[in-house]
Image (tube, helix red, strand yellow):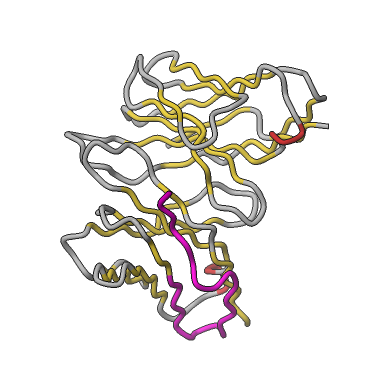
Amino acid sequence: GESVGLHLPTLSVQEGDNSIINCAYSNSASDYFIWYKQESGKGPQFIIDIRSNMDKRQGQRVTVLLNKTVKHLSLQIAATQPGDSAVYFCAETADFGNEKLTFGTGTRLTIIP
Amino acid sequence: NAGVTQTPKFQVLKTGQSMTLQCAQDMNHNSMYWYRQDPGMGLRLIYYSASEGTTDKGEVPNGYNVSRLNKREFSLRLESAAPSQTSVYFCASTETERGVFEKLFFGSGTQLSVL
């Protein structure tokens, strides 16, 4: 079946530096992608999403890049803060007619003070 | 804004016992979902309901049943709990309009242990 995977399970970044979390997907029909942040003991929290008609989207301190050619998604977090420490999940779906998100296994981001 | 509310937050069951996890959303969303999350794994879809009155199986439906009670509420039932069902369960909802998927909003989870 199709899968969504992450290149690195853990990532440590110095406070104030930028971080990049990567995600590979294998379903060529996927056209909606989303990043979630999950803090310990909490439910996933939406960060940013992107549709396949775009290759970049920016939010507050976050940027998502989509490379459909190599089926790769990345989340960039600028000027990381201690509150950014969490597990980050990417997820994808093929839009029309599909009601389901497929999640990756997650990357644990640790911000070093 | 309550968003998605799940009850209970914690539950311990013995093998063979039954229980129902409750979920309610106040965002008037059409679609609701139940996921489970196991250590080192992403969220896996158990069941979902695209609209009131409909339910469909997800990736891991065995051992579970669901009820979409009304537009707000979507419950998950374990008829005979097994240790393999020890997990954290998340309910989520979204508004999917004209087939265009939108982001899910998640509840805070139910941590279930089956002994």
> Measured from the top left, where is residue B75 in percent x and y?
53, 21
Depth check: B48 or B21 in front? B48
Q: What is the quadrant of residue A54 in the picture?
A: bottom left
Q: Is residue A44 left or right of residue A101?
A: right
Identity of the residue drawn at 71% across and 17% down:
B18
Question: What segment is highlighted magenta in the picture?
Answer: A1-22
Q: What is the quadrant of residue A49 in the picture?
A: bottom left
Depth check: A56 or B27 in front? A56
Identity of the residue drawn at 54% across and 58% down:
A105
Q: Quadrant of the C terminus of chain B?
A: top right
> Measured from the top left, where is residue B79 in percent x and y?
66, 17
> Measured from the top left, where is residue A107 in percent x and y?
54, 66
Q: Indicate whether A108 appears above or below A81.
A: above
Q: Quadrant of the N terminus of chain B?
A: top left
Please tell me whether residue A18 belongs to the stretch shown in magenta. yes
Q: Indicate whether B21 appears above or below B107.
A: above
> Measured from the top left, where is residue B102 in percent x and y?
29, 44
Q: Is residue B7 left or right of residue B82?
A: left
- The residue most toward the front is A1
Q: Indicate whether A17 appears above or below B92.
A: below
Depth check: A59 or B50 in front? B50
Identity of the residue drawn at 45% across and 20% down:
B73
> How many circles with numbers are drawn on the protein?
0
Please tell me whether residue B101 belongs to the stretch shown in magenta. no
Q: What is the quadrant of residue B89 in the picture?
A: top right
